[in-house]
Amino acid sequence: MILFQNAAEKLGKEYQCFLDYLEQNEVQLSKRTGHIGKKDCFALNGLFDLVQEKYQSYGWLQDHYTVIDFFYFFSVRAGILQITKKRGKGLTIQKSERYQPFCQMSAMEQYILMMSVWLGEYREALGNPYPSNMEERVFRAMRKVRGEEALPDPFRERAATFWGSYYIPEIRLLALFQLIRIEWLDEKEEDKENKFRIKALYPTAEGHALEKLLRKHGSEFCYYPDVSTVLSAIKNITKDDSANMEEKLMGFWEYSVETGNHTIEFKITIGPCIREIIMGDQFTLDDLHYLIQKSVDFDMDHLYYFQIGSGTSRRRYFAPECVDELWHADTTSLAELMPYEGMQFEYLFDFGDEWHFQITVKRISTEHTEECGIGIIKGEAPEQYYDDSSWE
């Protein structure tokens, strides 16, 4: 559809603006979170056309710039950008070899893939505390209006400042994909309750068209379990060969990472106890779990998880016994984590006693190794169980 072609081209320009800014300014990331800093978020936000937050200063973190956070999430998950540590510059982010294959996609292919990632993964990663299915509420409101009327507040059934009183990421994403249009307050307009300065939301032709398409195919903006399911539902917004497109886009998204090309040195810390573990990146997080347990002489008789990243990029990889969880340590290689020197993450063992281990990637060398090593840096290992025999 020509309708969505225009939307796709505008989205592509915004995303390229994001990538170019990071590259041209050699943006440094937070050492603690790996996120883009406040000043760069503020400057980058000012370059956008589709969704531009109306903040007066750079006091907001990345998670209050939904467009930046989504582009960051998508880029890192797709392997288009990779975090690295440069001597003298700290953590930074740069384009990978997967950038060119992505650029070779058509604007419509990029649009469909990014929308699929939004609904299939990013939406769940947001963990929005407000009522679920915000997108579906907006589309229901859209059915009640005609022409250029503003959308009513779906919670109060009247036009109100709800959109501006609370920070709602889904509203920004709907506008980013041009399914709605945001009207912002003018600089001279004052509304103390409307701290995010959204005056009204309006439906777009793209929004109406997608809502009708999804209803026709028996789908709505409800919960989608994965990117593949979403892509199958929305691929029909284009007249291109949707079967080949679906295969092409999923082939790009579900790429495999080469393993066995690097050796990683980890620093493991719990209280005053510090250990060193060296292993190849072909090993899994479950293997790392085993070595950590061995390094402190624990019994390995409880469940665990590794927590990687922060904000919407945070993932927890659970013990294989946690069958209801999405991500598991025994099926995730170290290479799949896209490790970099200085990377920090957490290992929690025993959901009852909660032993928190801090893990830092100290060094990565381009060597293959089948061996795993454990070294004692300093400190005695903590006692896993308290000896209360003295009370008897």
Image: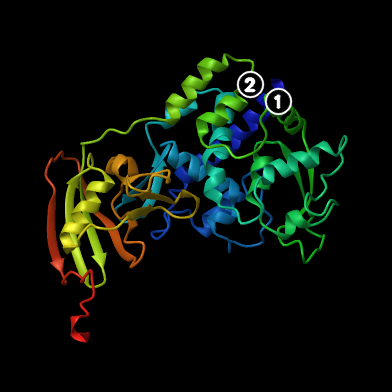
Quick one: 241 or 363, which is closer to the camera?
241
Identify residue for label 1: 213
The crowd level at tag 1 (other Cα within 10 Å; few <14, some 14-19, many 20+) is: some
Q: Residue at x 74, y 43 (%)?
A: 138
Task: Count the numbered circles shown.
Answer: 2
Q: Position of residue 55 (x, y in %)?
A: 66, 59
Instruction: Name above or below for residue 122 compared with residue 160.
Output: above
Horizontal side, residue 219 vs residue 114: left or right: right
Q: Kindly tell me whether residue 325 is visible in this rendering.
A: yes
Q: Kindly tell me whether residue 50 is visible in this rendering.
A: no
Circle 1 — which element? helix
The image quadrant where one finds the N terminus is: top right
Quick one: 177 or 84, which is closer to the camera?
177
Identify residue for label 2: 236
Residue 356 quadrant: bottom left
Q: Earlier in the sequence, mark 1 or mark 2?
A: 1
The image quadrant where one finds the C terminus is: bottom left
Q: Position of residue 212 (x, y in %)?
A: 74, 27
The crowd level at tag 2 (other Cα within 10 Å; few <14, some 14-19, many 20+) is: some
The kind of residue on which mark 1 rests is: Leu
